[in-house]
Image (cartoon, rainbow, N blue to C red):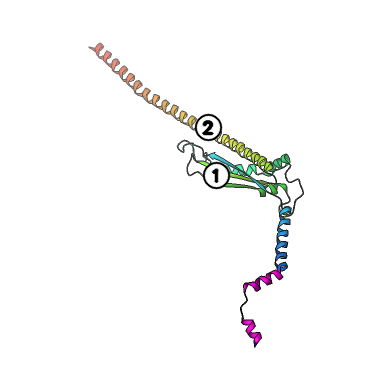
Amino acid sequence: MSNKVEEGVPRGWEEYLAIVVRRRWWILLPLFLCWLGVWGVSWTLPTSYTSDALISAEQEKVSDLYVMENVNVNLQNRLQSTTQKVLSYASLQSIIERFKLYAAPPRISGFFKPKDPVDQMRADLKIELVGAPGYRGEFFTFKIHYSADTPQLAQQVNSELTSLFINENVRAQRQLSEATTAFLDSKLADARAKMEEQEAQVSAFKAKPTRLIRKRFGAEGLSGNFDGSTI
């Protein structure tokens, strides 16, 4: 009966504190092991630094009244084509050889990445679309993110990628300008040929009544002379 009464009595905080003190190693040891494991893993994982670059491209300001739709290339399609050329295997392989990327043996996180250096670089590279133009003349903005082991390397590689994007965009814009100029020249040549043809037709039309009048006037003069001679 006394045991049942003692079990029903609630314990005070002093008793709980005494239990914690007696079993402190049961509490502190797992916490210490967890902290030690996290600290060890953090040392084995590589530190990653990301460099960002913001690029803005302007849509062509060529009126639809002068250039057909197939000449006015959409800027999103041009960006997609430029991205494919910049991120091609040969282009990325050249950057990898120049900066000696992915030459060190992989760490723990490296075993989960692709073995091919080009595929590793594509995994560390990200292109983010910021804003697209709603009409011709607006700016098309996107970001380039590249992650590397050191901040200097990330900045150098991102600067090289930015230069490739800009150069490829300038080349594509030059080709578009040449195509636009060639199209306008062909249209101008067609318009000049049509105008010359119309001028020739007008000149021929104006010459016809003059010849008829001269013929008629010559016929009337001959008949008058003939009548006078008869009188």
Q: Please give the name of the residue rendered at 26% of the width and 15% of the height, measured from the top-left corner.
A: 224
Q: Quadrant of residue 199?
A: top left
Question: Considering depth in this image, is 202 or 155 the residue closer to the camera?
Answer: 155
Identify the residue position indicated by label 1 in the image.
76
Query: Could you tell which of marks 2 and 1 lies nearer the N-terminus?
Result: 1
Magenta stretch, main secondary structure class: helix
Q: Residue at x 66, y 85 (%)?
A: 3
- Residue 137 in the image: x percent, y percent? 49, 39
Quarter of the image where one finds residue 76 = top right
Name the quadrant of the N terminus: bottom right
**Image check: 108 left or right of 142?**
right
**Residue on which disc 2 sits:** 181
> Between 138 and 210, which is closer to the camera in this rendering?
138
Locate residue 195: give its quadrant.
top left
Other-residue count near label 1 (Cα within 10 Å), few / some / many at <14 / 14–19 / ≥20: few
Q: Is residue 22 magenta?
A: yes
| In magenta segment, residue 4 | yes
